[in-house]
Amino acid sequence: MRRFFAPLLALGLAAAGAAQAEDTLTPLHFQSQGALGSIDKAAAQRGFLVYQTVCAACHSANALHYRDLEALGLTPDQAAGVAAGVKLADGSAATLDSPFKDPAMPASAFGGAAPPDLSSIVAQRKHGTMYIYKLLTGYAAAPQSVNLLPGHYYNTAFPGGQIAMPPVLRDNAVTYADGTAATAQQEAADVAEFLTWAADPNLSARHQIGLRAVIFFLFLSLVALASKRGIWRERA
Amino acid sequence: MTTDAKQSWAGERMPCLGGLCGALFAPRCTPEGKYLDTLPGLIAIALAFLTLSGAVMAAYYDPWHAFASVQFIRREVNNGWLVQAYHATGATALFGLVYLHLFRVMLTRAYRAPGEFAWWLAVKLLALLLFVGWMGFVLSGGAAGYWSLFNAANAAVSLPGAPGAVARWFLGGPAAPASLARLEMFHTVLALAALAVAGGLLAARRKVAPQPAPGKGVAFYPYYLAQYLAALAVFALIFSVLLFFAPHFGQPAVNALAADPLTLPAGTALPWYLLPLAGVADALPGLWGGVAGVAGALVVLAALPWLDRAGPDGAKGKLYCALTWILALDVLALGATSAAHDNPQAPLLLGLFTLWYFFHFLVLTPLVTAMEAK
């Protein structure tokens, strides 16, 4: 018996090792993707840090509350601490609101292109998670043939190729508490996972319940079909 | 007590209860019912559950802040995400069942007398549900829903005379929160009306169901109950795959964006179940063309019992069966083209597919059925 289990155990240890220093970049993958995907809480926490330090300067995520962060594994005290850092004039900090006090301000600052609310951005774009990553890592020098509009940057992922959002991610824009190297790619991948959670906070639960429901109804179907055949056979 | 004794005991005390006993226990059904015969029953059940989940959402829905309140249901209400996903997937499943039922009745030609009344009820159910489904889509407050309402409402309220007056009364002016408040009410009322039509469909179908040979009949309980339960379990299996793994199936992604009266998002579209009819409406020019297209498409469908010239007992030919399959493909193609309406070829294709749809009903059906009946 032991001979059988030894390779299995080795495999398990290798997997556990990989989980500790989870490398989501080579090859690029997101735990949230796929039929049974679930939110990678560690990545989403790092992603929140990126959102809060970088993106929140321009983007709101006003469908989210600071208390929602507890779903990512923050303790209530930690969530309260985050909220305390962004108190509004009246002392409240409930949702991740727009940093701009004047609603007309962002559009005028960016030549008419207001930074959109990011709460549901992943649901609004095709292959949203991957799109966010590609958008944030898609900045490049504009080719000769492209005439950049004033205040725009060349981006290979953005439809039309010209975006009013400057490249905001660079290596070590944040410092990760868990020791993950904060490369620009890592930050992009993490914030993409965070925004995936933001758009669909129940993704993990949905997949988990769904798997059980499907297994349950599969068995129920088999039992019901068999009992129907049994009952009808009795008649003959 | 024997079945007869039960029936007369209940019947003497409350006639309709006796009728129910009879329906359950009297050996009145033919023994070779098909699984797909349960479709009207499944439709009624799906509709009932859809109404229930709708009632839960109505407790939190706020037409004056439509998008935000749906977000609230999905994010804050306990298990609200499940109820909301259930409601959205329920619409998909319901339309799947209704389209399948209509197609099957066309294929088996069960719409011929005395089944024509049940057929009309089924078409009426489709028409009602399309309307209710569109209103639900608009109520979501998403960008796609908003612009769909905006276009429809602006066209409708600008009509001269009585139609415009009715539209203004119905919508309370062009796309505004007041319109959503009214649509929420009509969405509910017409959904209940659809439930009544579904009940009528069940009753009408029972009346015209084939009678068993004397002494050969089987009772609903337990035989058909077992069949219904099996069909329901398989349906629930398919439903849960959709609900948990594709909760946004067939919904335009732009609807995840809050409506903004100042920005028309690219690629607005409709949910899948509205697409074929929207294709017919798009293929015909002008507002009245669209209205006539939608009404005409449903009217020719309802007129099928007359358009079929074979008579109640006429032979069921192979050619007409093949044509019905082609019609199904045509409707699918209409939907697919309508979804890709930005494609430069789309107008031409929509025109062709719409032409075939009406050609099938108005020319091919009478011609081929009369020919095959000879």
Image (cartoon, helix red, strand yellow):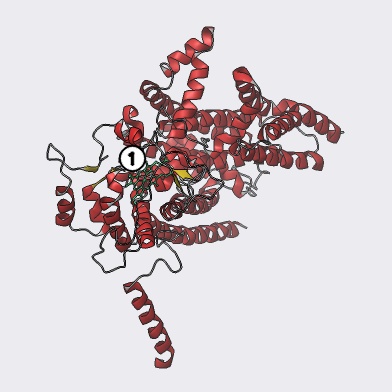
Q: Is residue A87 above or below residue A12?
A: above
Left or right: where A45 falls relative to B104: left
Q: Residue B211 appears at what percent x and percent y?
A: 65, 40
Say which quarter of the image contains residue A41: bottom left
Residue found at the far front of this picture: A144
Is B277 rendered above or below residue B84? Answer: above
Q: Nearer the viewer, residue B129 or A69?
A: A69
Residue sitting at 44 percent across and 59 percent down? A33
Residue B20 position within the rendered picture, expressed as x and y whole percent measured from the top left: 48, 37
Extreme top residue here? B161
> In terms of secondary structure, where does tag 1 sit?
helix
Q: Amino acid at mark 1?
A: Gln
What quarter of the picture does the C terminus of chain B occupy? top right
Residue B124 occupies quadrant = top right
At label 1, counting other C-alpha atoms closer than 10 Å, the crowd grade (few under 14, some 14-19, many 20 or more) is many
Q: Look at 80% across and 34% down and name the residue there.
A: B314
Counting from the top left corner in percent of width and height, residue B361 is at 73, 29
Does residue B46 appear in this view? no
Q: Quadrant of residue B209?
A: top right
- Disc 1 chain ID: B
Instruction: From the viewer's side, name the closer residue of B42 and B241.
Output: B241
Residue A129 in view of the camera: yes
Q: Nearer the viewer, residue B223 or B153?
A: B153
B191, above or below A155, in the image:
above
Q: Please indicate whether residue B116 sits to the left or right of residue B322 in the image.
A: left
Residue found at x 43% / y 28% = B187
Label 1 sits on residue: B71
